[in-house]
Amino acid sequence: MFDVEASTALSETQKRRVVARSGPVLRAVSQDERSQARNRELAVERLVDKLRAALAVPRKRVATTPTKAAREKRLEAKRRRAATKRRRRPPADE
């Protein structure tokens, strides 16, 4: 168990980020192994993983625009598809 708000290892901004994502207390439990010492090691590893994931800052998405070639390729594909559908129609009565 790790009390985020009482931690001296984290800065205030890090504490706010962890509390917002994971809550004020992080817990990790392990009952995978028969050894208590090994279970404790696994629990500490899981706790570190949770803390690291909560502290990760997501990267900003950079908006991009399609290239001219990509736009032309998309429009040409639309024209081909429209022509295919047009040819499937029954002939118009005149």
Image (cartoon, grey):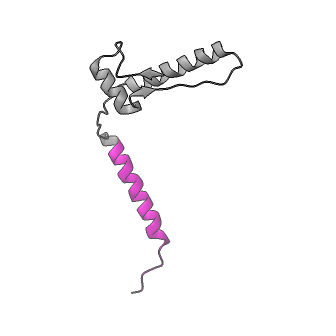
The secondary structure that dominates the magenta segment is helix
Residue at the location (64% across, 12% down)? 37
Side of 36 relative to 11 (left or right): right
Question: Where 2 sits versus 21, above or below?
Answer: above
Residue at the location (33% across, 27% down)? 17
Span shown in magenta: 70-93
- Is 74 a magenta residue? yes
| x and y percentages locating residue 34 in the rendered image | 71, 19
Residue at the location (38% across, 52% down)? 76
Q: Quadrant of the C terminus?
A: bottom left
| x and y percentages locating residue 53 in the rendered image | 43, 25
Q: Is residue 79 visible?
A: yes
In the image, 52 versus 29, the foreground residue is 29
Residue at the location (46% across, 79% down)? 91
Q: Is residue 58 visible?
A: no
The single residue placed furthest to the right in the displayed view is 34
| x and y percentages locating residue 32 in the rendered image | 67, 24
In the image, 5 versus 48, the foreground residue is 5
| x and y percentages locating residue 63 in the rendered image | 28, 37
Question: Where 23 sits versus 72, above or below?
Answer: above
Give the total of numbered labels: 0
